[in-house]
Image (spheres, grey):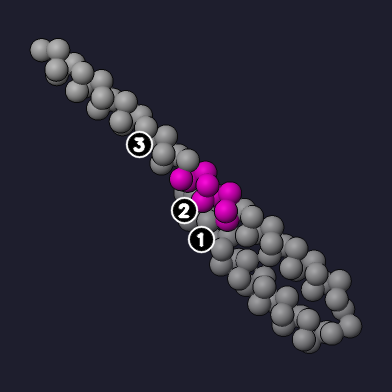
Amino acid sequence: MKKDTAAKIYEWASYIMLLGATVVFFLTSKNVQITLLILVVAVYLRALMYRARYKSYEEENETLKRDLRRLTAALKESEKK
């Protein structure tokens, strides 16, 4: 699974968990512990989403740096000739 796809899945899952926590809270106003548990899971999914995005951006940045080094080396080589 690509990191972009994982980030989107985590994002939508966190939205669904927040919606679920809201529904659970209003349906069972006495059961606050399960609502808090669902909210903690939603926050965890949100953190996973940001981590997946960060890893994706870091991977892309490394690819761009590698390409820049290769192009700089090619430019130096062409200037020598």
Q: As shown in the figure, which amino acid type bears the numbered disc 1?
A: Lys
The residue at the far left in this view is 81
Give the residue pinned by disc 2: 4
Q: As shown in the figure, which amino acid type bears the numbered disc 2?
A: Asp
Question: What range is drawn magenta here?
Answer: 49-57
Q: Quadrant of residue 35?
A: bottom right
The Cα atoms of the two marked residues, 2 and 3, are separated by: 17 Å
Q: Identify the residue at image location x=77%, y=86%.
A: 26
Q: Position of residue 72 (x, y in %)?
A: 26, 24
**Foreground tag (2 vs 3):** 3
Give the residue pinned by disc 3: 64
The residue at the far bottom in this view is 27
Inspect this view and state whether residue 66 appears.
yes
The residue at the far top in this view is 80
Q: Identify the residue at image location x=85%, y=76%.
A: 32
Q: Is the stretch drawn in magenta largely helix, strand or loop? A: helix
**Foreground tag (3 vs 1):** 3
| For the residues bearing labels 2 and 1, Cβ distance under 8 angstroms | yes
Q: Is residue 70 left or right of residue 79?
A: right
| Helix, strand or loop under label 2 | helix
The Cα atoms of the two marked residues, 3 and 1, are separated by: 23 Å
Mark number displayed over residue 8:
1
Q: Is residue 10 left or right of residue 39?
A: left
Mark number displayed over residue 56:
none
Q: Quadrant of residue 42?
A: bottom right
Q: Residues within 10 Å of mark 3 (few under 14, many from 20)?
A: few
Q: Identify the residue at image location x=14%, y=12%.
A: 80
